[in-house]
Each structure stands twice: as structure tokens, then as C-alpha cells.
Amino acid sequence: MSVEKNRWGILYCPKRDIFRPQKRWEKIEKCLNARQIAFDKVQSENSSSVERLCKMMINNGYKTIVIVGGDSALNDAVNCLMQTSKELRDEIALGVIPNGVMNDFAHFWDFKEGDIEQTIEWLAQRRVRKIDLGCIRYTNRKGEKCHRYFLNCVNIGLIASIMNLRRQTRRLFGSRTLSFISSFLLMIFQRMEYKMHLKINSDVIQRKVMTVCIGSARGYGQTPNAVPYNGMLDVSVVYHPQVAQLIEGFYLLFTNKFLNHRSVHPYRTREVEVVEAAHAMVGIDGRLMNSPEGSYMISIEQEVINFLIPA
């Protein structure tokens, strides 16, 4: 079955932690109908169904696929798109209506959860920009060669642990600020530094490191100068600061001044080789992944996804 060219395929990923999640969809549907946008909607049952449903939309011929969800749902969608041929992928535009626990990539483009009308107006104008994707290539515990694409960043170490805590506490509290504060308090129970061996450009880093962020976009405040269209990755390597400096560092992260901290060492590159990061958790776009076995490589692929951006 094929659909008409201008019809949107909408994948609705409801928040599981709020009362009456369908009320959010009713507002979105009202705005779509007011603008006379033709669309078909499917709803994800859980996080594992996003790639399957996105693949179904691609196979049915939708040229505009809009994810009503957060960073994890977008990550699943782009990984599904990257499984198709370049010729097919170039015909499809991906859009987002932010509706997740974390919506950092939507915020980069100034899409806001509370302004559905503005978001749909921008999407309807179909302004397309080709964007970059980062890619982590690794070996899993079965010895299989794997890869995973990302829009925002890969986190290695403490921040990956905290991002996981923040996701869980955001589901509990619903508030971005409260989830950040509670995650910060829970941080005292996390391991604070990891033995790492990194290769970035001509630099070799072999020492204990607290956290590393490798971002194609802002990386949840840790790579604030990164943009997903310059063919480069921004990298922030954070050595273990003193307690007072650590508190200052989280304040700077929360206020988008992360690179001002004396323990943060920034780089810009096209690839990073992680030779060793013993026992360090790894997060992709805010979601924990099974830790890679041995060394792994993180690189950038330039202008591979069509993304709908504000007019």
C-alpha cells in the first residue's frame, strides 16, 4: 500500500508517567485538523516498538514522518531510517513534536513542548535541512560487530549514570528541575572516576577521567557549541575535580556554561577512539546501552538525514 505524497505519518509515543496521556494527543490532533493536514497516526506500545512502526511507515510510502516523542524515540527513528537505501532516505523528511522525558534535540531547534500550534505551523512549511549523525561502532558481549547512530551525543562515565538517574527521576517527579536536583543528590552513590585511554586527533589521553561527552549537537549542555550540520564532533573530557569544583561544574552545566569549568577539556574532531573505559557506563541520546566489549570508535556521518526545522 502507498499513500499520497503530502500525507504525514505520525508516530505518537505517549509519556507513561503522566495522567491521561491521550489529552496531549487530542490537542495535537485539533491543531492538525485546524490546518487541514492529512495524516495517519500510529501509537507506540513501548520503546521497543518505535523502530518497527517507523519501518512500517517507510514501507507504506510516507514521505513525511513526524515523531511525537523525545530524544530516545527520535534516536530509534533515525536508526530505522539509516537501515534504508540512500535513495529512499533522501525522499523522506523526519520531524518532531516534543513529547518525551528529554527533548534536547527538539530544543536545539527551538521546538517547545508547550507550543504545539507553533511547532505544527513550522512543520507544515516543510523547511528541510540535512543533518549529521554520530555513530558508535563497537563489539557486543557475543563478539558481534554492531553500530548505533545518535543525534545528540554519546556519554561515557559519570554523566551517563546521571542521565539514566535523571530519566528515571523525571518519570517520578515530572519536573526537569526536580529531576536534576534529585539526580545530583543520588550522584554521591555513583562511581566518580574511570580509567580511560582515548585517542582524539593527535592527542592520547591515558588517565582517570570522570566523564566524556561526544556530541553532534549540544549533548545536554556538555558540548554547547556543537551543531548537527558541520561534519564535526565536539568532545568534552572532564577530569575529576575537587568537591567544590564538582558542585560548581553541575551549576555551570545547568546554566549552559559547562565549558567554563577548569576541569573540562574541549576538542573538535571527526572521530574518537575509545581504547579503554573500564567499567564506565555508556549512554546514547540519554539512554543507557549495553556496555561495549573492548575498544570502540565514535565518528560522524555528514548530512545523512532530512530533518524539518523551523521556518
Image (spheres, rainbow, N blue to C red):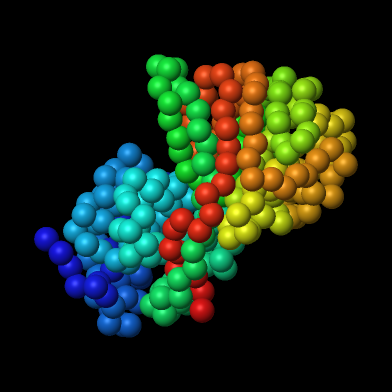
Q: How many marks?
A: 0
In-front residue for pair 121/170: 121
Q: In this rendering, does residue 297 appear at all?
A: yes
Q: Residue at x 32, y 82 (%)?
A: 35
Q: Is residue 177 visible?
A: no
User: Considering depth in this image, is 134 or 114 the residue closer to the camera?
Assistant: 134
Instruction: Check the picture and name the quadrant holding the N terminus.
Output: bottom left
Residue at (69, 45) in percent of width and height: 269
Q: Is residue 185 above or below residue 54?
A: above
Does 20 appear above or below 128? above
Left/right of residue 7 with respect to residue 304 in the rendered view: left
- Residue 63 in the figure: left or right of residue 303: left
Residue depicted at 57% across the width and 32% down the height: 297
- Compared across the picture, whether 55 is left or right of 100 comes to left
In which quarter of the view is residue 124 placed?
bottom left
- State the image quarter where residue 184 is shown: top right
Left or right: 200, with 265 as reference point: left
Percent from the top left, x then y, of residue 178?
62, 47
Coordinates of residue 86 in the picture (x, y in percent):
36, 55
